[in-house]
Amino acid sequence: MALQPTTATIAEFASWVDNTRYSRRAMVDDMLNDPIFDLLGEDTSNNRASVLSTNGVDYSSFAKAKTPGGSISRNAPVEADTHNIYYITFTHRFDYEREMILHDQYGMLNPGGTECIRALWEGVGLFLTNCVWNYNTASSIDQPAQTGTINYVTTTPDGQPIISASHSGPGYSSKTNIGGTAAFSGAAVVANIDVGIQNKTSQSGISKPYQPDAFLLGHNAALREGMMQYTKSTQVHSSANNAVTVFQNGSMDMFQFKYAPRTTTGAFDTTTSKLHKWATINKADFKQGFKYKWIEKPTVVEGPRVDTDNLDTFDIATCRIAFMPENPWAIVQNNATAAPISTY
């Protein structure tokens, strides 16, 4: 009697597809727990408009003394600058050929099933990093798309890049959040903070205190080691393998961007000022000033369980998100062009 070749039934193939769903949903949870989504603030409003418009009012002022019998002036809030913010959709498709399953190609019979979610995670992580860090001295980024690029505007409400020497508002003008070009050092940190103290201003023109409690940096080993020596912070190991790695339990926290310095396509960027730049931030202000908003959180759009034309199947990971730069006064950045000193 001739031996019959091993076959996989439709039910077995469908069971394999079912198994991948659970692992992908777990990967979505991991993605949403990336510290980059904690560093930034989330807009959870019910606004479902296709274009977001940031606006508000500023009540900043100092109460004044009153003489006996004297009149009291009326104080009106100052209307803040406003600008439009747009959503952007990310997608990644993975096709599963029946033959790939039958021959256990790429180890698919022991499915992780997380390929498309991992690509989505890395794509969104790179996008947010480009917006808030890699290209924060520019007015926009050219986001690679399925066809060509999408020009995504990243300016603050005053029309300036996040990092600019010309920030303005209804009550002030020509303020800077550039700390200089000095390499990271104790003296440079003091000078950086002084820039924030002298320039941080409310929309109505009231000087505001700048009290940084964390550093931002790219994926630069020398800069990381220098900051760790300066702050005595240690890595939160559970934050590894994310878009942002966290360092805590020192004089100031550290947030290191994994995708920095990078180009918009994800290639390593050797531009000196991007490689060595660093910044101080106030974490609470950073959450308020730089937000994101989901109109669709990461999800998997599942293809047919089995395509009757070729017995294949596919899944598409997708999400739609907006980056919302609302206030530049949470950050002061040094566009350093040299590595930090080695010891403190």
Image (cartoon, grey):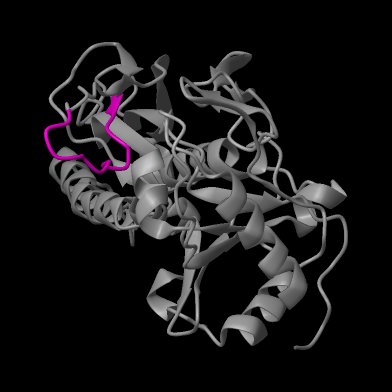
Q: Residue at x 72, y 70 (%)?
A: 223
Seen from the viewer's position, the closer of residues 28 and 284 is 284
Q: Main secondary structure of the magenta part?
A: loop
On the rendered image, what quadrant is the C terminus found in?
A: bottom right
Viewed as shown, does residue 129 lie left or right of 213? Answer: right
Q: Residue at x 21, y 40 (%)?
A: 66
Residue appearing at x 58%, y 34% in the figure: 162
> In the rendered structure, which segment of residues is drawn in magenta?
57-70
Above or below, 198 against 64 in this view is below
Query: Image quarter for residue 340?
Result: bottom right
Q: How far across and down, in percent of the image, does residue 315 sit?
A: 32, 32
State the image quarter where residue 35 is shown. bottom left
Give the side of residue 107 with respect to residue 344, left or right.
left
Front residue (pair 168, 148): 168
Name the residue nearer the viewer: 30 or 94.
30
Residue 293 makes an appearance in the image: yes
Residue 316 vertical placement versus 291 (above, below): above
- Residue 232 location (% of width, % of height): 56, 88
Q: Is residue 15 part of the magenta span, yes or no?
A: no
What is the x, y in percent for residue 203?
42, 29
Frontmost residue, 289 versus 52: 289
Relative side of 69 to 207, left or right: left
Residue 313 seen in the figure: no
**Looking at the image, is 146 positioned above or below residue 232?**
above
| Residue 69 part of the magenta segment | yes
